[in-house]
Amino acid sequence: MAIKDLLVKQGKVELVAEVIKKGDVREFEKFGKKGRVCNATIHDDTGDVTLTLWNDQIDQVDVGTTVKISNGFVSEWQGEKQLSTGRFGTLEVVGKGTSSPPSAASATQKTPGAKAGDDDEDGGGNGEEERGEDADLSINEEEVL
């Protein structure tokens, strides 16, 4: 899948893209649990989109890292699309320091070994939209874990 093809409220997103920007990490507490969130911008040859990183994902990626998002979910914040792994998706580092972003054509293959929850009707999203940098951090308790 290509970034240009992402639609708001779309689930089961599979794509490969390069991290071209990583924002500040914000810490929060919800339901008595502490967590961290950070927005990054990812790019393929069709465009850019904001990727919301949660907790351990933040430490996995830096600018120049190529990531594979499996079973991601697209939300919208202030008119802009945002991609997140939600509760059922995964982020995998597939390369570091590439000289050019991956092509959209190379991102169309599905990862073998689907996880439980892949058949979830909402596409693995948690039913809540993750928010941008200046927004209220309304997240699902399970994402903090």
Image (tube, helix red, strand yellow):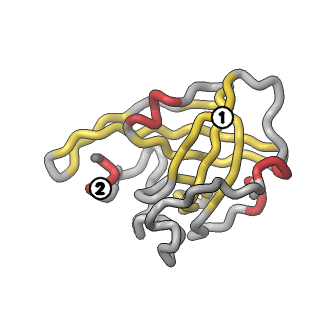
Residue type indicated by callout 2:
Glu
Residue type indicated by callout 1:
Val
Residue reaching furthest to the bottom: 121
Judging by the rendered image, the residue that carries numbered circle 1 is: 94
Residue closer to the observer: 8 or 73: 73
What percent of the width, then of the height, locates residue 81? 61, 57
**Residue drawn at (45%, 28%) of the image:** 59
Q: Is residue 131 left or right of residue 27?
A: right
Label 2 packing within 10 angstroms: few (<14), some (14-19), many (20+): few
**Residue drawn at (69%, 62%) of the image:** 6
Q: Is residue 98 left or right of residue 130?
A: right
Label 1 packing within 10 angstroms: few (<14), some (14-19), many (20+): few
**Residue drawn at (70%, 36%) of the image:** 18
43 up-or-down from 120: above or below = above
Residue 111 figure quarter: bottom right
Question: Considering only order in the chain, which callout, 1 or 2, is on the residue closer to the N terminus?
Answer: 1
Q: CA distance from mark 2 to mark 1?
A: 26 Å
> Which quarter of the figure is the N terminus placed in?
bottom right
50 up-or-down from 61: above or below = below
**Residue drawn at (44%, 64%) of the image:** 116
Residue 56 figure quarter: top left
Residue reaching furthest to the front: 113
Q: Answer yes or no: do the residues labelled 2 and 1 have beta carbons within 8 Å? A: no
80 up-or-down from 65: above or below = below
Judging by the rendered image, the residue that carries numbered circle 2 is: 142
Give the structural element (helix, strand or loop) at label 1.
strand
What percent of the width, then of the height, locates residue 126? 41, 65
Give the structural element (helix, strand or loop) at label 2.
helix
What percent of the width, then of the height, locates residue 102? 80, 39
